[in-house]
Every structure is written in structure tokens, then in C-alpha cells.
Amino acid sequence: MGKSGEDLGVVAGLVRASFLVNAGYAESAREYGLTVQQGQLLCVLMGRPYGMGDLGATLGLEKSSLTGLVDRAVRRGLVRREPDPDDRRAVHVLLTEEGRELAEDFYAATCRRVDELAAGLSKPDRDRLAALLGTIVRENEAPTVFLDALQP
């Protein structure tokens, strides 16, 4: 069963790769004084503001867990809540300027760490891996929890 240096099957390969990615994510979070969930929140909000319902669905969190996460991020000055112009009972969560700067730094550090995982692959192999992972992500409708590239 998958000794070091042996080819892995799809399941073992994806599971082990996810552990490597999660470890890189956690290392970046520690470096920037964040929890992994706070880092995920910041990365998700880099793309656009979210309503609480959509944010919970994207992050896979129950309402009470999400509320606590957002409350802590608000207290740190990383995000703010704004009223939804279309529904006065709802709010949008968005990054503050401080939150945006931290998110961009955290995102860049995480990208470097994760990119290093594939450093031993040739350019054609990296391109093929990206294409295959893209297919898996699209076919399974994975939420956009990490951007492809920083948006200006």
C-alpha cells in the first residue's frame, strides 16, 4: 500500500496531496497569526463580498460556527458587515483594508508553499496536473475558496 517512491492510486494520491496542501495552508496561517479557518475566510472574501448564507455554504460551516468566525474577524479589524441593500435583514461580509492586505500576504505565502509541492515536476507535467485538477474541480463544482490568481 503506497510505500515511498511507489506510484499511488487516485484516491491515495488525492488524499495524501490534500494533507500536504492543508499542512502548507496551516503553516501560512501560523506565520500570519491566523487560524486555518480565518485564512480560508480571508481568501474567500478576496474574490468578493458574501452574504452570510453563501459564505457558510462556501466554507462548509454551520450558522453558529460562521457567526463566531466572522465576529472574531470583525474584532480583529479584518472584515466588516454591511447591510444588504436588497434585504435589510441580511448583511454582506467584506474585507477591511487591513484584512485585504493580510489576505494578500497570506494568499501569496500559501501559494508559494503549495507551488513548492510540485517543484519537482517538469513544465508539461505541471500543466497536465493543473488541467486534471481543473477537471476534477469543475466536475465536482468545488466552491471558489482560493483564487487562481490575484485580481487587481
Image (cartoon, rainbow, N blue to C red):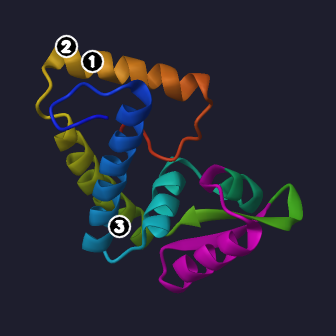
Mark 1 is surrounded, within 10 Å at the Cα level, by few (under 14), some (14 to 19) or many (20 or more) other residues, namely few
For marks 1 and 3 on the same chain, the one whose residue lies earlier in the sequence: 3
Specify the quadrant that holds the N terminus.
top left
Question: How far separated are the C-alphas under marks 1 and 3?
Answer: 29 Å
Is 79 contained in the magenta span? yes
Question: How far separated are the C-alphas under marks 2 and 3?
Answer: 33 Å
Q: Which residue is drawn at 30% across and 73% down?
A: 30
Contact (Cβ within 8 Å) of mark 1 with mark 2: yes
Q: What span is in magenta? A: 58-84
| Mark 1: secondary structure | helix
Determine which quarter of the picture holds residue 127: top left
In the depicted view, which residue is nearer to us: 91 or 35? 35
Is 148 left or right of 53, judged from the image as shown?
A: left
Determine which quarter of the picture holds residue 60: bottom right
Residue at label 2?
124
Residue at label 1?
127
The amino acid sitting under disc 1 is: Asp
Determine which quarter of the picture holds residue 115: top left
Residue at label 3?
102
In the depicted view, which residue is nearer to us: 97 or 118? 118
Residue 119 image point, x, y percent: 13, 34
Q: Which residue is drawn at 53% across and 77% down?
A: 73
